[in-house]
Image (cartoon, rainbow, N blue to C red):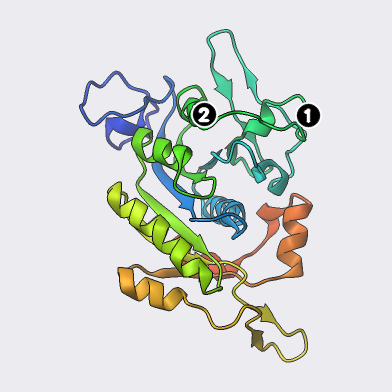
Amino acid sequence: MAESCTHNCSTCGSNCKSKDLRATLREGSCVKKVIGVVSGKGGVGKSLVTALLASKMRKAGFKTAVLDADITGPSIPTSFGVGAQKATGDKTGTIYPVKTETGIQLMSMNFLLEKETDPVLWRGPVIAGAVKQFWTDVEWRDVDFMFVDMPPGTGDVPLTVFQSLPVDGIVVVSSPQQLVRVIVEKAVKMANMMKVPIVGLVENMSYVKCPHCNEEIKVFGESNINGIAKDYGIPVLARIPMSEDISKAIDEGDVERLDADFMDAAVDLIKAM
């Protein structure tokens, strides 16, 4: 066990026999906090939120990691500009994560494929098994905060993560459309059923700032996020604007260089966990 790892054994690669132990980390690994990033549907920006949180927490001085659980649609490697890299391993079966420019540890299915454009044609249980292996077979070194980028919905992979990983909390991602309220509520109710704490809500594509007068233009109409937050007693962590700078940074693999001050409240809350 890494000397800096001072939390309970459920997140360490130790020999502890605690009944609370779930899937065990590889010997020598240590992950102090695990935060899932979820939504009830695709296309709302979970990977963006995951990448921003990992980057902001790294800038705050924490050692961070991303476990990309979206096996069939991974975008984390591209966001960090490491899509062409491959994960390495040794004869013991240990897999070593890819590191970003600032030292964020990443594990994604794309690091194991011959070509990053190759499809993964697997059924749900096999995909869920791969996600579990990303936890058990990868050597995660002294990680303060791991962010798990979940696939959309409430199926096999989210269930595997909630049941097999010691998740300390989840961040629910939404967009402003009225339809999304129902989808967000599904994710919130699933977390409650699995007894996983909800850190809060992040709304993506919240507004566009006028380049001339700086007015916030609500492209999708008025947001529903405050109503959802009030109904479930959870905080709104951030509202992410639709921005050419954000889109360009993701496309060019420069997410770590974004300032993203709109995520400061989310970072402050997660730091205090």
Residue at the (48%, 26%) spot, across then down: 129
Reading the chain from its start, which is encountered first: label 1 or label 2? 1
Query: Is residue 175 in view from this perspective?
Result: yes
Residue at the (52%, 64%) spot, across then down: 174
Quadrant containing the C terminus in the rendered view: bottom left
Residue at the (40%, 27%) spot, across then down: 2
Residue 131: where, in percent of width, then height? Answer: 50, 31
Q: In which quarter of the image is residue 83?
A: top right
Mark 1 crowd level (few <14, some 14–19, many ≥20, 10 Å Cα): few
Residue 135: where, in percent of width, then height? Answer: 46, 29
**Residue furthest toward the bottom?**
213
Mark seen at residue 134: 2
Mark seen at residue 49: none
Asked whether the beta carbons under mark 1 and mark 2 sit within 8 Å of each other, the answer is no
In the picture, measured across the screen, residue 205 lies left or right of residue 187, that is right
Q: Which of 101 and 39 is in front in this view?
A: 39
Residue 51: where, in percent of width, then height? Answer: 60, 51
**Residue that badge 1 annotates:** 115
What's under tag 1, amino acid-wise? Lys
Residue 33: where, in percent of width, then height? Answer: 39, 43
Mark 2 crowd level (few <14, some 14–19, many ≥20, 10 Å Cα): many
Q: Quadrant of residue 160?
A: top left
Quadrant containing the N terminus in the rendered view: top left
What's under tag 2, amino acid-wise? Phe
Query: Is residue 273 in view from this perspective?
Result: no
Residue at the (77%, 34%) spot, across then down: 84
